[in-house]
């Protein structure tokens, strides 16, 4: 089975995958805008490095709990709740206007990452629920490849959006991407 055949024949996976595409494009679009904002406000590489810590460290602490929760609760509910929560949280980045408010971005990003630590295992564990056994390998492969493509395209679009219409627009677009993903799920 090909990727296109899977997407054409399996409506549930198609919606599931489109939600992933939209959400992940928004993530990387947002990331470029955030780094641009931090450098613009502070001019500090240290501030950007601290953002990398805020973006990756919460996963280390939250993931063990998230795995247990995902195994015990309705995964679809987790996915939709996580997307809606992240949509609201990302809008918190709009509050960052000055260098002395950069701390807000760390809190928002850490919270988004913590929620994502629930979303990702729920998403991965849900793939067998929306595919047949014959479709599973192709669906997992497509889902994994989508992350890499989203990183490249989302970053490029993030750079363009940030340069052309500003970082605020990128944050709003990311919030809309989470809301769209929730609707698709």
Image (tube, grey):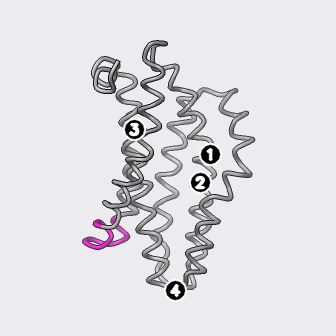
Which of 76/131 is in front?
Answer: 131
**Cβ–Cβ under 8 Å for marks 1 and 4:** no
Q: Measure the C-alpha gap from mark 1 to mark 3.
A: 17 Å
> Foreground: 155 or 104?
155
- Occupied quadrant, residue 82: top right
Quarter of the picture holding the N terminus: top left
Q: Position of residue 102 (x, y in %)?
A: 56, 77
Tag shown at residue 19 = 3
Rendered view: 15 above or below 21? above
Mark 4 Cα within 10 Å, few/some/many (few <14, many 20+)? some
Secondary structure category for the residue under label 2: helix
Q: Which mark is residue 117?
A: 1
Q: Residue 80, percent across and down?
A: 50, 37
Q: Are marks 2 and 4 in contact (CB under 8 Å)?
A: no
Q: Residue at x 55, y 75 (%)?
A: 48
Q: Are marks 1 and 2 in contact (CB under 8 Å)?
A: yes
Query: Does the magenta portion include 19?
Result: no
Q: CA distance from mark 1 to mark 4?
A: 29 Å
Indicate the secondary structure of the residue bearing disc 3: helix
Q: Which residue is mark 2?
A: 113
- Indicate the position of residue 170 as horizontal and vertical percent values: 36, 63
Determine the residue positioned at 51% across, 51% down: 86
- Decide which of tag 1 and tag 3 comes sooner along the chain: 3
Q: Which residue is mark 4?
A: 42
User: With 156 as the anchor, is 69 left or right in this view?
Assistant: right
Q: Which residues are magenta?
A: 160-169
């Amino acid at each position: 089975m090909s990727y296109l055949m899977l997407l054409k024949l399996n409506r549930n996976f198609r919606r599931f995958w489109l939600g992933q595409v939209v959400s992940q494009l928004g993530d990387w679009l947002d990331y470029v805008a955030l780094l641009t904002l931090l450098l613009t406000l502070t001019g500090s590489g240290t501030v950007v490095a601290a953002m990398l810590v805020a973006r990756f460290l919460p996963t280390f602490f939250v993931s063990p709990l998230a795995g247990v929760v995902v195994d015990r609760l309705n995964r679809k509910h987790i996915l939709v709740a996580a997307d809606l929560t992240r949509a609201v949280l990302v809008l918190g980045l709009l509050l960052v206007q000055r260098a002395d408010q950069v701390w807000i971005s760390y809190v928002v990003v850490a919270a988004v990452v913590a929620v994502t630590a629930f979303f990702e295992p729920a998403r991965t564990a849900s793939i067998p629920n929306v595919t047949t056994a014959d479709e599973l390998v192709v669906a997992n492969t497509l889902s994994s490849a989508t992350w890499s493509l989203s990183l490249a395209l989302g970053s490029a679009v993030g750079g363009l959006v940030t340069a052309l219409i500003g970082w605020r627009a990128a944050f709003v677009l990311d919030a809309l991407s989470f809301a769209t993903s929730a609707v698709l799920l």
